[in-house]
Amino acid sequence: MAAEYAGKEKTFLEQMHSELNIYGIPRHWDLGEFMGYPIQLNAETIVFTWVAMAVCLLLGWVAVRGADMRRPTKMQACFEMLFDFLRGLINQSMDPKKGAGLFSIVVTFFLFISVMNVLGVVPTYVKPTADIQTTFGFALITLCLIYIWGIKYKGAKYFKHYVSPNPIFLPITIIEDIAKPVTMAFRLFGNMKGKEIMILSLLALITGTGWLAGGFLAGTIWLLFCIFISLIQAFVFTMLTIAFVGGAVSEDH
Amino acid sequence: MVSLDFNATVFMQMFHFLLMLVLLRLVVYRPLMNIIEKRQEYVASEIAQAENQRAQAAELRAQMEADLQKARDEAKAIIDRATKASEEQAQEIMEQARADAQRLKEEALADIQREREKAVAQLRNEVASLAVLVASKVVKKGLTIDEQHNLVQEAIKEVGQLH
């Protein structure tokens, strides 16, 4: 199969990808120029981000609708468990007072990334998180959070950790700061992209005689595994955000 | 296919995230957190109330037990008093009965004595007259009045020694 496409312009993965794009979404949206730079948006990513946003809001609406103090509805109970779980994580890694403001951001991270990841399991849908733009955007938000929380609770003293115990460490700490969002972004991106490539590869196998052994069965099992990976990766991203912000505000730095 | 070029999508996704944060906060987190807070308050107040009620119940129970003990003591006192009174009454009745019996016995004895005396007197008279009759028959021929009289007296004496 791969050999069939190898000599052509498109790889077989790109072929599969464009064949599955039944909605006719273009590759890019060009929105003119801004100060000499072209404004280009990855159309699929944006569209499926909107879908994910709609799903998130729908889930939230279902949870809030008919929410009751005495008898929680099923979705409400799920959300409450998620809240408790993430609040526990925050309180473990930092002072609860400092973590209070972080709570809704962390919950949004987890919910939004989970929904985006799981969206890829739906046939013909594309995961927004399988695009480096999305994961980098989120990782930049985490980087901002680290600085905001560090400066908010430590003031100018926050920058002291770059040169302590010795200014020699300055390059290392700067690299560390750059590495934090980059690793987060690439971890999520790599996992999701790999997942997508696997799905497409397995789909590509569903032709000819070997479809049952090669494509369909493996594809089904892989899709189940995808859901698991999706949630794990969303959790890892959330957990790392909490850990980094917790490290920024902790006193014993 | 895996392109690593950055474009404006990064900022768009950041904007999407912030939008999502604001929307979810308004639509989902705040109402749910309110409900959770309300539930916590409710549980706390229920626990406080339950503790309060338990304390009250303990107090009430102690009071009840004290009352019960008092009632028991009173009942015991009443029973004791009643028992004592009844015993006294029984004693009194017994004594009365004994006295009555004694009196009846004495009366009976007196009656018997009186009857006996009456009988003895009657017998004495009859014996006297019978003796006189017999003696007069036996000694019709030769006894004087004085001798008769003496005989009678002797006879009476003997009869008097009879009882």
Image (spheres, rainbow, N blue to C red):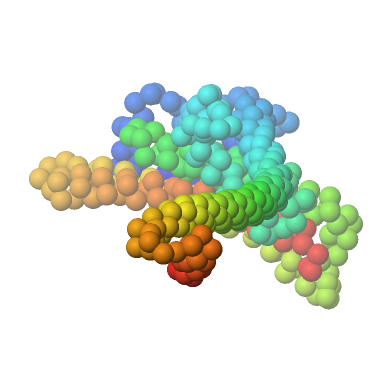
| Residue under the image location 56 percent in, 29 percent down | A68
| Residue under the image location 73 percent in, 31 percent down | A35
| Residue under the image location 80 percent in, 55 percent down | A150
Q: Would you identify the image quadrant in which residue A155 lies?
A: bottom right
Along the horizontal axis of the image, is B117 left or right of A159? left
Along the horizontal axis of the image, is B160 left or right of B32? left
Residue A205 image point, x, y percent: 21, 46
Along the horizontal axis of the image, is A7 left or right of B156? left
**The C terminus of chain A - image quarter:** bottom right
Q: Is residue B38 visible?
A: yes
Above/below status of A218 relative to A243:
above
Q: How many marks?
A: 0
Above/below status of B82 relative to A60:
below
| Pick the front one: B46 or B20 | B46
Residue A235 image point, x, y percent: 53, 51
Q: Is residue B79 visible?
A: no
Residue B41 image point, x, y percent: 69, 38
Residue B148 image point, x, y percent: 48, 62
As drawn, the residue found furthest toward the left would be A209
| Pick the front one: B144 or A126 | B144
| Residue under the image location 47 percent in, 54 percent down | B125
Q: Would you identify the image quadrant in which residue A60 lies?
A: top right
Above/below status of A23 relative to B54:
above
| Pick the front one: A11 or A195 | A195
As drawn, the residue found furthest toward the front would be B142
